[in-house]
C-alpha cells in the first residue's frame, strides 16, 4: 500500500490508520509512505504493527523523493508474491499522471 502523506493539513490520519489496521489484519505486508508527513504516518503504522505483533510487515517513508521516484520504488520493490497494490491518495488527478508515467 502506498499512502500519500504530503498534505500539510493531513487530517484523515485516524481513518487511514484504521484502514491500515484492517489491511494488516487482512494480510497486507508492505506499506510505502510518501510526502512531508510520511515519517509520522510511518511511525504510526509501526505502532500498529507492534501492537498486533506483526513485525514482518515492511514499512518505508519517503519525505524528500519525488512522487514519480516513490511510485517507481513502490512498483519495482513490491515483492513478487504481492500481486495487488493499493494507492491511497488525496488528489487522484495528481497521482494519475505519476502512475501513467511509470512503466514496468
Image: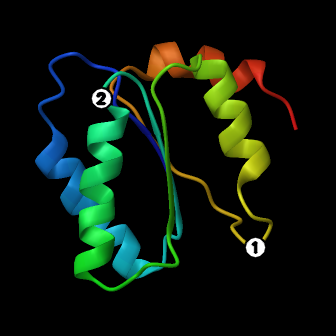
**Vertically, is 46 above or below 53?**
above
Residue 72 position in % (x across, y down): 73, 33
Q: Mark 2 Cα within 10 Å, few/some/many (few <14, many 20+)?
A: some
Q: Residue furthest right?
A: 104
In whole angstroms, how far apart are the C-alphas of marks 2 and 1? 29 Å
Residue 84 position in % (x across, y down): 64, 61
In the image, 103: left or right of 23? right
**Vertically, is 33 above or below 47?**
above
Q: Quadrant of residue 22?
A: bottom left
Residue at 60% in and 54% down: 85
Q: What residue is disc 2 on?
A: 37
Q: Mark 1 Cα within 10 Å, few/some/many (few <14, many 20+)?
A: few
Residue 48 position in % (x across, y down): 25, 69
Which SS class for mark 1? loop
Q: What residue is disc 1 on?
A: 81
**Vertically, is 13 above or below 31?**
above
In terms of depth relative to the viewer, which is nearer, 92 or 7?
7
Q: How many marks?
A: 2
Residue at 22% in and 55% down: 17
**Vertically, is 11 above or below 93?**
below
In the image, 57: left or right of 84? left
Residue at 41% in and 24% down: 35
Residue at 28% in and 83% down: 52
Q: Quadrant of residue 68?
A: top right
**Quadrant of the image for the C terminus?**
top right
In the image, 51: left or right of 82? left
Residue 56 position in % (x across, y down): 52, 78
Closer mark to the observer between disc 2 and disc 1? 2
Which SS class for mark 2? loop
Amino acid at each position: 500500500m502506498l499512502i500519500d502523506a504530503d498534505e500539510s493539513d493531513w487530517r484523515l490520519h485516524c481513518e487511514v490508520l484504521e484502514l491500515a489496521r484492517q489491511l494488516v489484519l487482512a494480510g497486507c505486508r508492505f506499506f510505502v509512505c510518501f510526502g512531508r508527513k510520511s515519517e509520522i504516518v510511518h511511525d504510526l503504522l509501526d505502532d500498529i504493527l507492534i501492537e498486533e505483533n506483526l513485525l514482518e510487515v515492511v514499512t518505508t517513508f519517503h519525505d524528500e523523493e519525488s512522487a514519480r521516484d516513490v511510485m517507481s520504488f513502490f512498483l519495482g520493490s513490491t515483492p513478487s508474491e504481492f500481486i495487488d497494490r493499493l494507492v491511497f491518495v488525496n488528489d487522484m488527478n495528481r497521482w494519475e499522471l505519476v502512475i501513467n508515467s511509470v512503466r514496468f
